[in-house]
Amino acid sequence: MNLELLESFGQNYPEEADGTLDCISMALTCTFNRWGTLLAVGCNDGRIVIWDFLTRGIAKIISAHIHPVCSLCWNRDGHKLVSASTDNIVSQWDVLTGDCDQRFRFPSPILKLQYHPRDIDKVLVCPMKSAPVLLTLSDSKHVVLPVDDDSDLNVVAAFDRRGEYIYTGNAKGKILVLNTNTQELVASFRVTTGTSNTTAIKSIEFARKGSCFLINTADRIIRVYDGREILTCGRDGEPEPMQKLQDLVNRTPWKRCCFSGDGEYIVAGSARQHALYIWEKSIGNLVKILHGTRGELLLDVAWHPVRPIIASISSGVVSIWAQNQVENWSAFAPDFKELDENVEYEERESEFDIEDEDKSEPEQTGADAAEDEEVDVTTVDPIVAFCSSDEELEDNKALLYLPIAPEVEDPEENPFGPPPDTSVPPGAPDDALPGGGDKKQRQPSSEGGPAKKKARTTTIELQGVPSDEVHPLLGVKGDSKSKKKTAGRPKGSKGKDKDFSFRPKPYKGERPPYPMGPEALSGSGLGGGGGGEGGMKVRAEGALAPGSLVSQAFKQHNIGGMD
């Protein structure tokens, strides 16, 4: 579809809700690829769900982590995806195959990940209570970025639009601009709240077009700066923000902020409710407030790279916000003019003449001249919206869409069996089978293809970083009331006893066989609401579905062996 024809003449921001994307699991974070054709959603069960955004269908599901996914980022050509989970693991994924290329284990939880905008070999990682780390994927090396104050390690960081510089901000409001290649300090300034008081930096976001970036601070004000002015001011400069955006009425704190695809609008998600505030960057006026369901808390916000569409996450569901598209199927002649009132028509002198006597023989113009021109139907013009300002051509190797193979319920031939022309007599030895006597070669893997190579895991050692930190998604450290139940898939035997919510009591003697019939269930208090003294009440969320067998917990332990 031609993006130039979709350019609206009015506002270029969403106005209303346009449906939801249900990932089955609880969604926590989302991000678009560079063209907005694919949307990656990280879930609380460790899966990454990739949506085809044009068809609004699931294109791929990657079983990435055991613990919840807290951060995601696409690389420039869309072939790779890097993810972080709440158990401090950073992984790189091949989007086409779903395989893990490599893993990195950090000592503290990961707050943010970002690929280098131009170099797919570098990833910026922001660990909790640590200085930002620049990872090099090819050789698994890392560089710890310098910070302004070693005692204040609540640091956020972001690449600028082309990855030439890294901007870092700490809890004292100090912004450092570092050269990406040399890690040298290029410029710095301090964000102040009118007086000499400083405010903590919560996030730094750059626009896809232009040199502007925004800083979300703890004083509930979003400040928009020009990156060129920051570099001009140098070290300890005092640049003035282009705009200061805030909710003066409710004093709303902001959970997540980002620019629109064209950099003309800024959206901020409230930390108190599911509400999106949209400002026009050039003027600084609030143009729209989008309200979601009452009582829900916002987790993440992402603006589509080329369209006026916003994706927001609350209560584990991805909500889509878009413009109200009014279809108009009426068609008019190219020279048709709509008149507001009657206009007196002035007739040309030769308008109704069969032949214009005064007309001279002109050269070929208009349609006649166009007939003689050769039309080029082979050259494909690049889409301007997909190209950067310093690029003339699109990336031919870019991954815009994911191929989907149809699911065949009853395949006619077994793709992993012997070819049809080979006949093996019954009772023949294993050596007579195709492929020799190696049975492992004949058995397909559980994935239905060749065995996958195990990804290399690299442990990143960071000096002086506490290893007992808990990710903000999982609750506050040390507070047993606020600490949530550990999310994610059960680890099985690897998780040991600490991962289970119950402890089996020691049972002496032989265990009686557990009856599996529905009568036995109703008699023991599991199937129905009754039950005697030894009966056990089942919570609504763990109740058995009609016709199903015993749940997993009851398969492992009988009634007498559970708390």
Image (cartoon, rainbow, N blue to C red):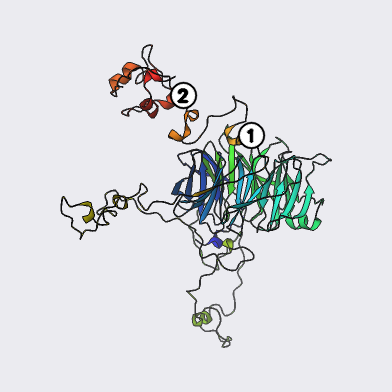
Locate the C terminus by quadrant: top left
| Disc assigned to residue 502 | 2
- Between 338 and 93, the residue placed more toward the observer is 93
Residue 412 in the image: x percent, y percent? Answer: 24, 53
Q: Residue furthest top?
A: 533
Relative horizontal placement of residue 138, taking residue 559 as reference (left or right): right
- Between 59 and 443, the residue placed more toward the observer is 443
Residue 166 in the image: x percent, y percent? Answer: 69, 53
* Earlier residue among tags 2 and 1: 1
Callout 2 environment at 10 Å: few (<14), some (14 to 19), or many (20+)? few
Q: Secondary structure at mark 2?
A: loop
Q: CA distance from mark 2 to mark 1?
A: 34 Å
- Between 470 and 288, the residue placed more toward the observer is 470
Q: Is disc 2 in contact with disc 1, using a CB cutoff of under 8 Å?
A: no
At x 55% / y 68%, what residue is drawn?
335
Residue 167 in the image: x percent, y percent? Answer: 70, 51
Q: Is residue 153 positioned above or below 234 on the image?
A: above
Q: Secondary structure at mark 1?
A: loop
Observer able to see residue 392: yes
Residue type at the position of mark 2 = Phe
| Disc assigned to residue 453 | none
Callout 1 environment at 10 Å: few (<14), some (14 to 19), or many (20+)? some
Residue 485 in the image: x percent, y percent? Answer: 53, 29
Relative horizontal placement of residue 526, taking residue 168 as reference (left or right): left
At x 38% / y 11%, what residue is drawn?
533
Q: Quadrant of residue 404?
A: bottom left
Observer able to see residue 322: no
- The mark closer to the camera, 2 or 1, is 2
Q: Is residue 160 positioned above or below 505 on the image?
A: below
Residue type at the position of mark 1 = Arg
Residue position marked by numbered label 1 in the rendering:
272
- Between 346 and 471, the residue placed more toward the observer is 471
